[in-house]
Image (spheres, rainbow, N blue to C red):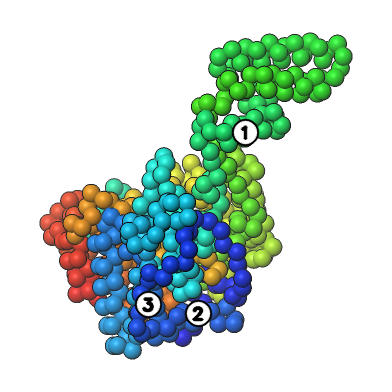
Amino acid sequence: MTNEAIIPPIPPGDRKFTGGSQGTFENKVVAPSVGKKIRYETDGKLWVPDNPIIPFIEGDGIGVDVTPAMIKVVDAAVEKAYKGKRKIAWMEIYAGEKAKKIYQKDIYGNDTWLPAETVGLIREHIVAIKGPLTTSVGGGIRSLNVSLRQELDLYICLRPVRYFDGVPSPLKNPELTDMVIFRENSEDIYTGIEWKAGSAEADKLMKFLCCEMEVAESKFLCKQGTAHDFSKKCWFGMKFCSFFCSLFCKKGAVHNSLCRCLIKKNYVHNFSKECGLGVKFCTKEGTQRLVRAAIQYAIDHDRQSVTLVHKGNIMKFTEGAFKNWGYQLACEEFGASPLEGGAWMKIQNPKNGKDILIKDVIADAFLQQILLSPEKYDVIACMNLNGDYISDALAAQVGGIGIAPGANIGDRCALFEATHGTAPKYAGKNKANPGSIILSAEMMLRHMDWNEAADLMIKGITNAIKNKTITYDFARFTQDAQERKCSEFADDIIENM
């Protein structure tokens, strides 16, 4: 069978991947004895056999609980929907703690957290799903989630946010929240291009910025703006520069020369020791492929608006460029026209003739508006960091990340995932809410065009929550709830299909 998938893919083609997978290509994964690979047809459409091989990563921490629950629910939904005519052939692949135990160390003697075999199998099988993976804070290994997204060029982080009746929420009307977030997944500060304070690399970059790019001229050379004796020297130096310029009328040359002299003389002792540095970048290509997908989604799913969320009032050449390039794409590829009296635009949905509003909003104002007027927003397109904040904030409005699904999607493959962390405190206790990864699997089935099974999963989880047979995270806030274990909640979903 074929389908257009969630995001219309481009025809297959060679793509260069770089990043964090490790080691030689060890063959540790056991392929299922039956099953066929999903593939792309020559026209770019997804072909899904009746017995597709789906790679899955169990995940760390509570992955041991939620991932088996997800598999059980998916298998039951597929069986009920298709009466044995379709069946998923699950294939476990490894990342995180399991990979560390199974695979050899890499050539540098480091533990293997993300094997090359795992990345290769996801790319080869096109559709995969994973549980939560370990991510250290302030040091240690690089984020495995980010590494997977970058190596596979999964540039869309797709996060639908909707309310299920009966889920406890801090809002009076959580049902008004119904949005789909398109978070740019490959750029911004999440690329991991940063250097530790006091490192030789950070020192070298700071010297370059100050001495060659003259960043210090606007950022550091002010009367109160710098610490210690450097600020005083700079201030008096600038006073001298102004006097000197008035005599010789060579303000620019003297000004810049003096700035460089002061910076080079005083830089090492004042800025190199306590300053970590990171790089934020935003490309036209990265922005426009995300916005293109967001607008196409709005067209395909009869959505009313696409909102570009940004902080362009402060970061004009990154966040501001994101906004500008987004509007440009809407004009050039979708025929958007300006609305009278403002900067917003509209396009006509070619499938039904309705108008789709293309608008933008500053990120901090947006975080306020989603609480005050969530019904005004529909499809959201944003850069990486803003998208991280927004998706978790919106999830809290409808019950938390325990029931928030997500997918990472590119032109060549899609990786669905639990959006929460590993919660090691609850690992193996059969207590965690499997809702996030179950709903992510529901998204996966729709991506495969197995909509009948996906509908059954939604029916099952909706009724289980209405019946108040729920896991502890919901039960503690719900009157007369029947607290269920992770595996029992999965059974309740199956019973209610």
- Residue picked out by circle 1: 204
What residue is shown at x 37% (from left), y 64% (from top)?
94
In the foreground, 60 or 77: 60
Mark earlier in primary sequence (2, 3):
3
What residue is shown at x 55% (from left), y 45% (from top)?
193
Mark seen at residue 31: 3
Where is 228 relative to 277, above or below? above
Q: Nearer the viewer, mark 2 or mark 1?
A: 1
- Residue picked out by circle 2: 39
What residue is shown at x 49% (from left), y 73% (from top)?
124
Residue 418 seen from this side: no
Residue 431 vs residue 401: left or right?
left
Mark 2–mark 1 Cα distance, whole angstroms, equals 47 Å
What residue is shown at x 77% (from left), y 14% (from top)?
242
Residue 162 vs residue 335: left or right?
left
Mark 2–mark 3 Cα distance, whole angstroms, equals 17 Å
Where is 279 relative to 72, above or below? above
**How far across and down, in percent of the image, does residue 382 sit?**
53, 52
**How far across and down, in percent of the image, does residue 225 sit?**
58, 20
